[in-house]
Amino acid sequence: MPAPGVSCFMGPTAGRLPVASAPHTLPSCDRGDPMGEQENRSVVEQLWRLMEKQDWQAAGALLHDDFVQEWPQSGERIRGRENCMAINQNYPGFPTQTVGRILAGGDLVTSEVRLDYGGHLYHGVSIFEFRDGKVLKETDFFAQPFDAPGWRAQWVERM
């Protein structure tokens, strides 16, 4: 168990970098089952693999019966796994996906992904909420890369 007020995450920095709890952090490990966190993380990893392979049936099976997906930037809410999979199946020019960090805490998992739509790049963050070992809700944020302003160059390094 982590110290009070410290969250733990399953990922490449697990056990090395405690993260102080704040109102908007993932739940601390003492509020969730560590085995459940590992399983939830595995579901997200599997979901990304299946989406990349465009295996809609298998990907849909990882979604809860009451699944909801939200895209706040466009103001859209998708209800049901069938609608979610239909959108992906009919998406013009489905992107190549490169998954980055995946962090798990309690019934929440977040992932970073780089999406390449034939040379048009986007960075995404997805927040997955779980119930009964399946994805109940997914909230996705997307942004295109942009040039950094010169005024702050003295304080930053290029990634």
Image: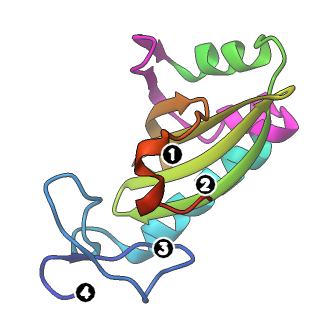
Does 9 appear above or below 105? below
Mark found first going from the N terminus, 4 or 3: 4
Q: CA distance from mark 1 to mark 4?
A: 26 Å
Question: Which numbered disc, 2 or 1, marks the residue that appears first in the sequence?
Answer: 2
Residues marked 2 and 4 touching at CB (< 8 Å): no
Q: Closer to the camera: disc 2 or disc 4?
A: 4
Q: How many marks?
A: 4
x 58%, y 23%: residue:
81
Mark 2 sits on what residue? 43
Give the residue number, with chain letter if any, for mark 1. 134
Q: Does the magenta-highlighted stretch encompass residue 25?
A: no
- CA gap, disc 3 and disc 1: 18 Å
Secondary element at tag 2: helix
Residue 88 in the image: state x and y as whole percent. Answer: 72, 20
Q: CA distance from mark 2 to mark 1?
A: 8 Å
Image quarter in which the N terminus is found: bottom left
Q: Residue at x 46, y 28 (%)?
A: 67
Color scheme of the displayed model: rainbow
Magenta residues?
Answer: 51-79
